[in-house]
Image (spheres, grey):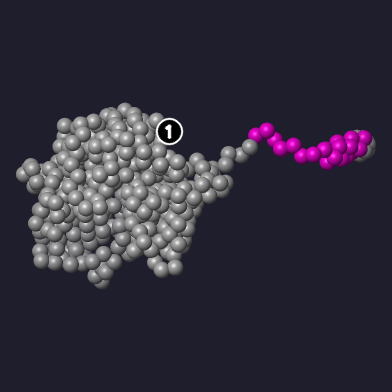
Amino acid sequence: MKKRFLSLLSLLILPAVLINVLSACSKPYTPPEWEWEDDKVSNSDKPKYIWVDAAANFPDFANNKENITRDLTIAKNAGFTHIIVDVRPTTGDVLFNTDVVGQVQYLGAWTSAGYTKVERTATWDYLQAFIDEGHKLGLKVYAAINTFVGGNTTSLGSQGVVFRDDTKKAWTTDLNLPGGIKNIMQADKNAKFFNPVRDEVQEYICQILEDLAAYQNLDGIVLDRGRFDSFESDFSPYTKAKFESWLGQSVTNFPGDIIPPGTEVGKLPSPLPVHFKKWLEFRVKVIHDFMVKAKARVKAVNPNVKFGVYVGGWYSSYYDVGVNWASPRYNTSSKYSWASTNYQNYGYADHMEFMLIGAYAAANKVYGSSEWTMQGFTLKAKEVTMNDVKIAGGPDGNFFYPNQVPSGTDVGTAIANSVDACINAGDGYFFFDMIHLKANNQWQFVKNGIDAANAKK
């Protein structure tokens, strides 16, 4: 009886269901009111950064606010959204208010008269002028510092705190050179780097950063040269003692058991010296820990300012300067034989709020999937940072000068394509440096690229 009742009920319900289905099919489809969130950011919403090197642009900007307004307006009209103004060049002196280090008195720059000393006679605040003029135009303004430098030597002379203060001169790095270990002050190098391992150096830089962060309307801070000077750095007794303490044993054959003098990046000995991998691990730990400390000091002063870095995109050999800018989740040792198992633990991408990638390749090397192409550098950066941080890659305008462009390469197309290659492979676009666009009158080319990228969804 129960089965017969259910069968009868089914016969009564089925026609009603069919009528509803057919009725629904006859109406146009109406999408639901809710939508899944789309993680893809349109190119028009991605940041476009342009770097303003202090020395190269000093003839225009050192003493002239009108020129700052003029060129920021041009940058804005070309499509750039973020200005990176260099306020601590390689001399180690500064272009913002601080009592920690002296103000820039002059910088060397190339002009029509050759390499010339450009003096700063103006008394107005250089950084604040960029902030004020940039904000009037709706631009974000970030300040960049050359981090672990304390002086610079050129044909115009030597300047910087290491040439004025013997205490800080003692903080400079010792280099492992073919002729023996030598302090950088006696070496044939222009930029005079500090030893990043030294506690006094890290404290000194953090004090400078605190004063920079005190600019409450500054949008961001970029650390450039937040690294060791080179593969040869640092082999001082101070660093040897720190390394041995961390390692838990003495190194009797120093530097031979770490890096034999004259060893070149990319031409490592086989087998590797006994302490080589641990030495690389120690160095990236030093830089990682400094970045964590520096960010905390900046945020304590100004929680709203963004904190990030510039790094070169050649990750495969960036061990030479003691920086692991990857995600700590990126297993470096599974890809590169020079890395220890724990090398990945000192990737600092997860501590950054943005990262600028030098995708510095020749004008005919825009597209590609490997390093030494602009697109490849940016793709590699996305791979190793594993979405821990937003990255923006881009070219060095030095490669777009007429004498640098390979035969058969159209420079205008190359510049426009650099935007396409980098912005679609990453999270933004980065151009170094404003001076190159000005010198070669190439603003229209980069504008063409940005306009085309923005038109894409």
Q: Is residue 297 above or below residue 331?
A: above
Q: Which residue is mark 1?
A: 138
Q: Is residue 138 left or right of residue 167?
A: right
Q: Where is residue 155 drawn, in percent x and y?
A: 14, 55
In this orientation, does residue 149 appear?
no
Q: Where is residue 316 drawn, in percent x and y?
A: 34, 60
In this orientation, does residue 400 appear?
yes
Residue drawn at 20 percent across, 31 percent down: 123
Q: Is residue 300 magenta?
A: no
Q: Quadrant of residue 308?
A: top left
Residue drawn at 26 percent across, 68 percent down: 268
- Which of these two is toward me, 142 or 441? 441
Q: Is residue 130 above or below residue 418?
A: above
Q: Where is residue 26 drawn, in percent x and y?
A: 85, 40
Task: Identify the image quadrant of the N terminus.
Answer: top right
Q: Which residues are magenta?
A: 12-34
Residue drawn at 29 percent across, 31 percent down: 128
Report helix, strand or loop for mark 1. loop
